[in-house]
Image (cartoon, helix red, strand yellow):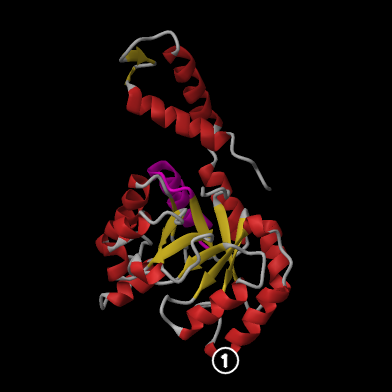
């Protein structure tokens, strides 16, 4: 199982089926949310809406309620009656807790509590996990904090630690990582800077909470012409070199060449806009 989505994933409340198609068409994949976006009294209607929907399963992720809850089991029961087979489990905290998800499903655990972040390596090692995602606000709440960011929008140290831990744990198992949502919807410049940092750090996607964020995320993950040109030139030069060499004032070794290959891979990714 592989993570085969573009970089911009868009959440859509499961109890708003009139928004499904727009979100599906706008983003690289839509995350139909049966958890926090839906009030308890609306969850059954949301499940029915999901069951009645007819979207491309290859670009649908369903976020379900936390493992071990009655809502989680009800979510899985309705998913089994659809064509959707990629499940994001909210507040995942251990590999064992995910045993109820059928092994044939692609699994994206959402690590957004202290327990979940600590368990990131064991969760990433599960065979049907294709990606990990982390969440900042629930994480900080789980340890008694009140905010994941400073007033200037930068993450506090504990959030940066969790972000890095989840990214490294996923990469160690060859899995993708999805960056957390950017809550300040009007601040597109802040979103762009954070998404550019995510792409440069090795994240494969960023989750969005508003359609206006989608194109900003796509552009942030797409290398600019200068970076792509450098990557093409250095890889071409490497074909005639042996070992470490000097190129345009920089010493080039295998890690730098891997960076260049990653830039080319991102530049060649399909563009759904």
Q: Residue at x 37, y 73 (%)?
A: 138
Residue 199, how many percent across, how many down? Answer: 45, 45
> As rendered, which of 125 and 120 lies closer to the eye?
125
Q: Residue at x 47, y 85 (%)?
A: 70
Residue lying farthest bottom? 41
Total marks in image: 1
Q: Secondary structure at mark 1?
A: helix
Is most of the magenta stretch helix, strand or loop?
Answer: helix
> As rendered, which of 200 and 56 lies closer to the eye?
56
Q: Is residue 158 in view from this perspective?
A: yes
What residue would you read off at disc 1? 41
Find residue 144 and report its image quarter.
Answer: bottom left
> As rendered, which of 241 and 151 lies closer to the eye?
241
Q: Is residue 13 in view from this perspective?
A: no
Residue lying farthest top? 240
Residue 24 vs residue 183: left or right? right
Residue 137, how many percent across, how many down? Answer: 38, 71
Q: Residue at x 31, y 72 (%)?
A: 140
Number of other residues with Cα within 10 Å of mark 1, as a class: few under 14, some 14 to 19, many 20 or more = few
Residue 253 vs residue 212: left or right? left
Residue 56, how many percent across, how many down? Answer: 70, 58
**Which portion, as a residue range, is magenta?**
186-204
Determine whether 217 is above or below 236 in the image. below
Find residue 118 and report its image quarter.
Answer: bottom left
Is 203 colored magenta in this rendering? yes
Determine whether 88 is above or below 36 in the image. above
Is 4 colored magenta in this rendering? no
Residue 153, how many percent across, how many down? Answer: 38, 62
Q: Residue at x 46, y 29 (%)?
A: 261
């Amino acid at each position: 199982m592989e993570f085969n989505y573009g970089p911009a994933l868009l959440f859509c409340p499961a109890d708003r089926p009139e928004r499904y198609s727009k979100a599906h068409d706008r983003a690289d994949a839509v995350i139909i949310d049966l958890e926090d976006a839906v009030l308890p009294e609306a969850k059954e209607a949301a499940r029915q809406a999901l069951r009645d929907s007819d979207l491309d399963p290859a670009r649908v992720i369903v976020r379900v309620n936390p493992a071990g809850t009655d809502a989680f089991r009800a979510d899985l029961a309705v998913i089994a009656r659809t064509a959707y087979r990629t499940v994001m489990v909210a507040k995942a905290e251990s590999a064992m807790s995910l045993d109820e998800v059928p092994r044939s499903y692609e699994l994206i655990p959402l690590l957004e509590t202290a327990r979940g972040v600590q368990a990131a390596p064991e969760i990433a090692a599960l065979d049907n996990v294709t990606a990990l995602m982390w969440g900042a606000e629930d994480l900080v709440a789980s340890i008694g904090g009140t905010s994941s960011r400073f007033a200037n929008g930068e993450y506090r140290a504990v959030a940066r630690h969790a972000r890095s831990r989840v990214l490294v744990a996923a990469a160690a198992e060859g899995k993708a990582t999805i960056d957390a949502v950017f809550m300040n919807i009007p601040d597109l410049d802040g979103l762009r800077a954070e998404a550019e940092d995510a792409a440069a750090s090795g994240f494969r996607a960023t989750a969005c909470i508003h359609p206006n964020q989608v194109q900003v995320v796509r552009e942030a993950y797409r290398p600019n012409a200068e970076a792509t040109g450098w990557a093409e030139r250095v890889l071409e030069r490497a074909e005639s070199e042996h070992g470490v060499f000097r190129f345009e004032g920089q010493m080039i070794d295998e890690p730098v060449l891997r960076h260049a290959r990653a830039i080319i891979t991102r530049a060649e990714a399909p563009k759904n806009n």
